[in-house]
Image (cartoon, rainbow, N blue to C red):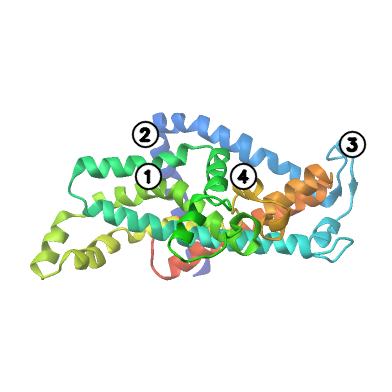
Amino acid sequence: MNAAASNNQMQAIKVKHKGFLRTLCSQWQMALMSVPVLLYVLLFNYFPLRGWIAAFEDYNPKLGFYGSNFVGLKNFKDLFGLGELPPEEFLLSIRNTLAMSVINLVFGTVSSILLAVLLNEVRKTLFKRTVQTVTYLPHFLSMVIVVGMAQNIFASGGPINDLLAQLGLIKEPVFWLGEGRYFWWLVGVINVWKEVGWNTIIYVSAMTSIDPCLYEAAAIDGAGRFGKIMHVTLPGIKSTFIILLIMNIGHLLEAGFEIQYLLGNVKVMDYSRTIDIYVLDYGISAQKYGLAIAAGMFKSVVAIFLLLSANFVARRLDENTLI
């Protein structure tokens, strides 16, 4: 029985392999077009992974990867306070990264779906296109420009404090940029303003593929506009939402670098330092290359684990999966 099962399994693998080759040969033009993309990914995403060897070395640029002293797991122990360095800095960077990532994920997803639903309900094509254009244009602005605008808006004498004072909500100007308790939320607000229009495009596209007959059936059943949204529109974009959620969970340790680096200052350093800034500080400023690469390696491994875990949970719930 075991031999027969093994033979059947081998036959199935051969058939699948032949089917793949047959498909590849029949679509050789598409395969040829994908070669530059494949080379790009190999060159810039996988070839640099050879540098991970420095995470296990006391790396010296003059000696290179294969000439530096091998120190084993020393750099990883230093990261988590089991070696010479205190663990507070790296643990704080993990906390800040996760906090800002979750805020960006929740705010970004909710605002994108809400804007997409509102645009889907608009019947005036000109107004709809105008709103889409205005909302996704900030995506193309440099983060330096966006942070400069945010610094002026949230300054002590900026329009936000003036508005709150006129409404009687505050008596003294709030130091938005100098208090750590506001920093994570400011980053979330800025990211939503910059990316909400761009992220909405995907959901609007998913809504256009919903069968109009479903809306007609909902209307016959007595559903109003809100009922159509709840029972037709939102279920219609469920698969898109799941795929994007899995991808975003895989990027939970990528809260960003530019906005935190540009908007941060000494007073909010305990709230602004992310893993990327930690890598920059130790890899460039302190020249602890092995420690910085170990931090980046930890970030990549955790991201892969989160992605696979989210994909596994989605599969167990019979939802669409990324892998």
Instruction: Decide if residue 8 is in sight here.
Output: no
First along the sequence among labels 3 and 4: 3
Amino acid at circle 3: Leu
Secondary structure, mark 2, is: helix
Q: What numbered label is drawn on residue 258?
A: 4
Q: What numbered label is drawn on residue 63?
A: 3
Q: Nearer the viewer, mark 1 or mark 3?
A: 1
First along the sequence among labels 2 and 3: 2
Judge left or right: residue 206 versus residue 152: left
Q: Give the residue at x 30% y 51%.
A: 206
Amino acid at circle 4: Glu
Q: Residues within 10 Å of mark 2 (few under 14, many from 20)?
A: few
* Distance from Cα at disc 4 to Cα at disc 1: 21 Å
First along the sequence among labels 4 and 2: 2
Q: Residues within 10 Å of mark 1 (few under 14, many from 20)?
A: some
Residue 91 sits in quarter: bottom right
Q: Are marks 1 and 2 in contact (CB under 8 Å)?
A: no
Give how far across and how far down residue 83 sits, in percent.
Answer: 87, 63
Secondary structure, mark 3, is: loop
Q: Nearer the viewer, mark 4 or mark 2?
A: 4
Amino acid at circle 1: Thr
Q: Give the residue at x 42% y 58%.
A: 109
Q: What numbered label is drawn on residue 26?
A: 2
Judge left or right: residue 216 versus residue 293: left
Amino acid at circle 2: Ser
Q: Nearer the viewer, mark 1 or mark 2?
A: 1
Q: Residues within 10 Å of mark 4 (few under 14, many from 20)?
A: some
Residue under label 1? 135
Near-viewer residue (254 or 312): 254
Q: Is residue 301 above or below residue 290?
A: below
